[in-house]
Amino acid sequence: MDALRHGWPLAIEGAPLLQPVETAFSDVAGETMLVSATRAATLKLANQREAAVPSTPVLLRGAEAFDLPAALAVADPALDLQNPLKGPFKALSLEWEEQARAALELARIAGILPAFLVDPSGASEAASLQPSDLSEFTDPARLRIATRARLPVAAAEGARIVAFRSPDDTREHVALIIGQENTDKPPLVRLHSECLTGDILGSLKCDCGPQLNAALHAMAHEAEKGGWGVLLYMRQEGRGIGLVNKLRAYRLQDQGFDTVDANTRLGLPDEARDFPTAARMLELLGIRAIRLMTNNPAKVDALSAQGVEVAERVPHSLPDNPHNARYLATKRDRAGHLLP
């Protein structure tokens, strides 16, 4: 991931050299590009035979070779209205699909645009790996408790924090425990994905900050009644696409796209959060059953699939405002959230 952010190409056994477009140097060019299926659909390639299989990466050829400005225009939908795309584009046969999927997933984890120049001219030293190496970045079993500490917070002065770390991932997740731990009694649990804009800056475009604050106070109230609560604070900004890509999606929302379509235009999934890691955090805390604060039935299903017993789904709705009303409606109408 560090190599991708520094603009190094990837040398994955069984695939051509792959140069990440977003972080590439100015003298890099290529005849073809690798893009995600969702970005290919935005480029109107879904009707072509080689791009017709949903979720399959697409090898792309344009009317002429891709220099870096042309490649960036294909990769970044925020540039769609600024730079004419050099089409028409054609989807080519992809003989190294496993490697392509690994490369695009690594780009998502690294927080860069999921687009690569293929066999780029002028490429520098490459980072070499096997397709199977990706499993090390996504294996929750490697997660461990790193440390614990007392952490008085505004909602609960007796709160304790637990930090988790994996040897293969730079993202460090934490759990905040409120009340007296009792593994015989399911705690009130909120799985909260990091949101810098909402949690820290008080953004009105989402409901993340108010949800976080309300969850902590609900857990404190639970503790007063003899129960307890656990906040899982997950380092997966923007539903797993990263801060920069989330802000790119905001820019697209300002152009009229909803949050789902904005992610699709970026070539990214609308849902890329790491629920197996959340389940592993609960396992390490000795928690088998929970009362989950969520409006999202898919989150209940995802944790249940990982062996977590969701004894109760606790609704967690808050009033909207003029800036997030459309966002909340999209979550209700397109993502299945149970909102008023």
Image (tube, rainbow, N blue to C red):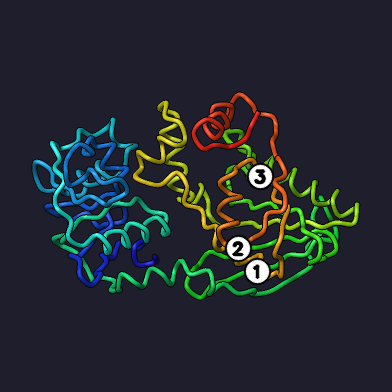
To which residue does mark 1 refer? 283
Query: Which residue shows up at 53% across the image and 64% down it?
Result: 171
To which residue does mark 2 refer? 307
Q: Position of residue 154 (x, y in %)?
A: 81, 51
Query: Which residue shows up at 71% across the image and 40% down it?
Result: 315
Query: Which residue shows up at 59% across the image and 51% down it?
Result: 193
Q: Position of residue 50 (x, y in %)?
A: 17, 47
The mark closer to the camera, 1 or 2, is 2
Query: Which residue shows up at 63% across the image and 37% down it?
Result: 207
**Mark 2 or mark 3, which has the lower sequence index?**
3
Mark 3 closeness class: few <14, some 14–19, many ≥20 residues within 10 Å:
many
In the picture, the disc for residue 305 is none
Q: Tell whether 217 sits left or right of 86.
A: right
**Direction top: furthest residue:** 322
Question: Do the residues bearing badges 1 and 2 touch, measured as CB atoms within 8 Å?
Answer: yes
Mark 2 closeness class: few <14, some 14–19, many ≥20 residues within 10 Å:
some
Q: Position of residue 317 (x, y in %)?
A: 69, 36
Nearest the camera: 222 or 68?
222
Q: Amino acid at mark 1?
A: Glu
Q: Tell whether 194 sits left or right of 183.
A: left
| CA distance separating discs 2 and 3 | 18 Å
Q: Tell whether 325 sits left or right of 170.
A: right
Q: Amino acid at mark 2?
A: Gly
Nearest the camera: 227 or 163?
227
